[in-house]
Amino acid sequence: MTLELVCWAISVAIYIGFSIVFAIIKFGVPPSVSSLYRKLDKIGWPPWLYSLAMMYSAMFLAVAGGTNTMGWAAMFLVVTGIAGDTSQGKVTEWLHIVGAWGCMALGLLALWVDYGYWILSIFGLALILAIWIPRLKNKTYWIENAAYFVVAFGILNHLIYLDIFHGWLV
């Protein structure tokens, strides 16, 4: 369990460090996490830093999650990271979008199916819809972050055996 907690902490540190702290300090709230790919290039930084951040965050979260479904969710995030430059064409854009939605959907599904945290899955879906339906500025960014943190919280809960959402709610 110690390895999984360390992997969880590394994943969250990478994600928060890159997608929130770095992004907001350097650029303000971006339209989406993936928009950082192009923004990095504009300031002279290698855009593949976005790809690395998504891939490493995903791989460490997959180890922490410890299930096949979480592994597949992480691999969809890797696809999103690899297909970071959506301006390269329709195929890259399609792969990026499928990767992002696949990661979010499988992450929430894993909370329900693998851990039995159905209420957390429903909460995550409701939160995504609450952000998506109104015309919020930068809603893609907030949806991506909401999905990541709901899944990360579910994994942490599972790892440290809080069982807040298990037992009486299953």
Image (cartoon, rainbow, N blue to C red):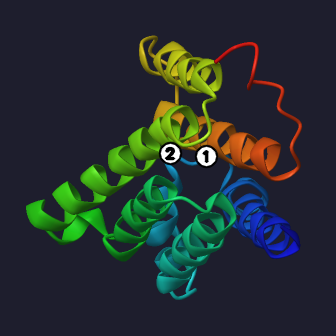
Q: Quadrant of the N terminus?
A: bottom right
Residue 19 in the image: x percent, y percent?
A: 66, 58
Q: Residue at x 88, y 49 (%)?
A: 160
Q: Residue at x 61, y 63 (%)?
A: 66
Residue 84 in view here:
no
Question: Image check: 158 left or right of 6?
Answer: left
Residue 84 in the image: x percent, y percent?
A: 37, 69
Callout 1 secondary element: helix
Question: Image check: 42 left or right of 82?
Answer: right
Residue 154 in the image: x percent, y percent?
A: 70, 40
Contact (Cβ within 8 Å) of mark 2 with mark 1: yes
For disc 1, the marked residue is 148
Callout 2 secondary element: helix
Dividing the picture into quarters, in which one does residue 83 lie? Answer: bottom left
User: Label 1 is placed on what type of residue?
Assistant: Tyr
The residue sitting at the front extreme is 167
Residue 106 in view here:
yes
Question: Image check: 71 left or right of 64?
Answer: left
User: Label 2 is placed on what type of residue?
Assistant: Gly
The residue sitting at the left extreme is 90
Dividing the picture into quarters, in which one does residue 75 lie? Answer: bottom left
Give the numbered dot on residue 107. 2
Q: Quadrant of the C terminus?
A: top right
Name the one closer to the observer, 7 or 92: 7
Q: Residue at x 26, y 51 (%)?
A: 98
Residue 115 in the image: x percent, y percent?
A: 62, 39
- Compared with 132, 52 (above or below) is below
- Compared with 72, 167 (above or below) is above
- Compared with 135, 46 (above or below) is below
Label 2 or label 1, whichever comes before in sequence order: 2
